[in-house]
Image: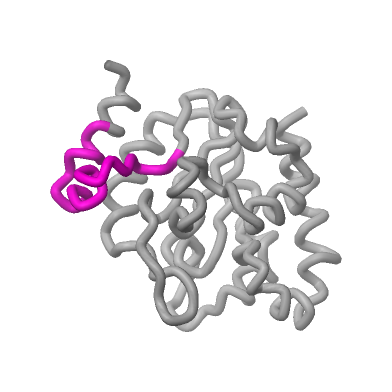
Amino acid sequence: MTPLKKIFTAIKEDPMNQVYTKQGIDPLYSASTKAKILIIGQAPGRIAEETKLYWNDPSGDQLREWLQVSRETFYDTDLFAILPMDFYFPGKGQSGDLPPRKGFAEKWHPKLLELMPNIQLTIIIGSYANHAYLATSPKETLTDIVHHYAQYLPKYFPLVHPSPRNRIWQKKNPWFKQEVVPALQIQVQKILR
């Protein structure tokens, strides 16, 4: 059994995840020793869990548009790795999906990252991931982090969540599509060439 497969099995067997494992729900992420770009997001949504394919919804379509990559390229595990802050759909809340469980990413990300030595860029999506990986203070907003994306390069590239719910945010912050998305596309294409 490969080290990556051992971690997958350990995640399924973890008491924290037994409610999912007993229902036949596997952790939803992608890790490969060959991957060049890592995407860290929030957690799989309901559609992703049902179809067993991460970013398989309108948010994923928007993300691929921002990255300027096809579905085929995006799902090529030799190119992209996907590590959400929680590998299971957390359920629905009053205003969207519930947040990822605390302590999950802290437990499993380091073990998986250690086995992915070829990552050249980590794209951090949404407030939970950005605050876990990049925020310098609890008061720092996601808008501030994304607006100052260049200070995190070349290792990290922060993004807002590509959910249709964020269209209002994008209208209020036109610099995102004018400056940030083109800069992201340049970084991604440089690595994929």
Which residue is at 37% across, 65% downward?
91
Q: Position of residue 45 (x, y in %)?
A: 48, 57
Q: Is residue 33 visible?
A: yes
Which residue is rendered at x = 26% and y = 49% of the image?
A: 20
Q: Is residue 21 above or below residue 143?
A: above
- Picture residue at 66% right of the left edge, 57% below the top: 58
Q: Nearer the viewer, residue 98 or 101?
A: 98
Residue 183, image quadrant: bottom right
Q: Is residue 155 left or right of residue 167?
A: left
Percent coordinates x, y for residue 49 in the rendering: 43, 49
* Mark count: 0
| Location of residue 97 in the rendering, given as x and y in whole percent from the top left corner | 44, 69
- Nearer to the camera, 166 or 78: 166
Quadrant where the N terminus lies? top left
Direction right: furthest residue:
178
**The residue positioned farthest toward the top in the image shown:** 1
Question: Is residue 18 left or right of 163 when viewed as pictured?
Answer: left
Q: Look at the picture and state if 33 lies above or below 45.
A: above
Residue 9 position (above or below residue 155): above
Residue 184 in view in this figure: no
Query: Quick check: 175 left or right of 41?
Result: right
Q: Find residue 55 and report its horizontal and vertical position in percent.
A: 57, 49
- In this rendering, the answer to whether 130 lies above or below 56 is below
Q: Does the segment drawn in magenta span residue 191?
A: no
Q: Which residues are magenta?
A: 9-29
- Residue drawn at the location 60% of the way across and 64% of the way down: 161
**Does the magenta-highlighted stretch encompass residue 14?**
yes
